[in-house]
Image (cartoon, grey):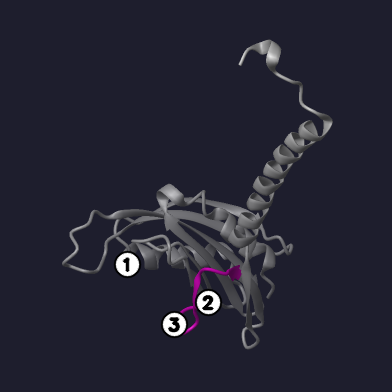
Amino acid sequence: MRAEELTPLSLRQRLANYLVILAAFAAVAYGFIYRNSIISATFPFINREAGITARYPARWLLDESDSRFVLRAQDPDTLPFKTAIRLQLIPIGQDARPADILDLLDIDRAARLPAYRSLSRTPTVLPGGQRGQQMIYAYAYIDPNPFLQAEPITVRALDLVVLRTGQAVVITYEAKADVFEKHKHYFESFLRSLTF
């Protein structure tokens, strides 16, 4: 066909072209919104005995059976080391400070975890207004299965310690070092929903 033989598009054809483009943009926008709602979906966690409520990511595994923790939620998709959020309660004396609890955790972990290093400590305020102290640390995770000859994994973690009457609330976030910042939004969302 030559250029002279082309007929201009009618109003209806132009309108149809614009509507198709608009529908494509709307479908992509809906896809992003739907994806974000699935990624940010949460389930409620309620422990009346400890007086704690929170929301954890919906696709994560919840473990309440370990007596050392009130809750442990792990992401099953992040193998071989599962990104985790833990909450534990430690009995304390009257004069305890958050820094004392972090010292206790430091000593315990240095004995248990290979290549453990405390990286930083800073005062912090939780979204609910409670004041506490934060510690970032790292260690090497070695798979306990002797038949898997895998390299150690560098794990980066964060502890938040907040005191309440007679107890220290320790909230821990652990992830592989290369996804620590990427998955931190799960921890921040957990903190925003946490009440005790």
Q: Which residue position is annotated with label 3?
A: 66
x 61%, y 62%: residue: 38
Give SS at disc 3.
loop
Please, what is the dominant secondary structure of the magenta stretch?
Answer: loop
Label 1, label 2: how far apart the Cα atoms are: 21 Å
N-terminal-most mark, 3 or 1: 3
**Which dot marks residue 71?**
2
Q: Is residue 89 left or right of residue 3?
A: left
From the viewer's perspective, is residue 4 above or below residue 72?
Answer: above
Amino acid on which the number 3 mark rests in the picture: Asp
What separation in Å lies between label 3 and label 2 (alpha carbons)?
Answer: 8 Å
x and y percent of residue 47 in the render?
62, 84
| Stretch of the chain drawn in magenta | 56-69
67 inside magenta stretch = yes
Q: Secondary structure at mark 1?
A: helix
Asked whether residue 126 is in view, the answer is: yes
Q: Amino acid at mark 2?
A: Leu
Dot 2: element:
strand
Residue in the image at 62% along x and 68% along y = 42
Decide: few, some or many residues near mark 3? Use Cα within 10 Å; few <14, some 14-19, many ≥20. few
- Residue at 27% across, 61% down: 142
Q: Find disc 1 in the rendering and name its residue.
A: 112
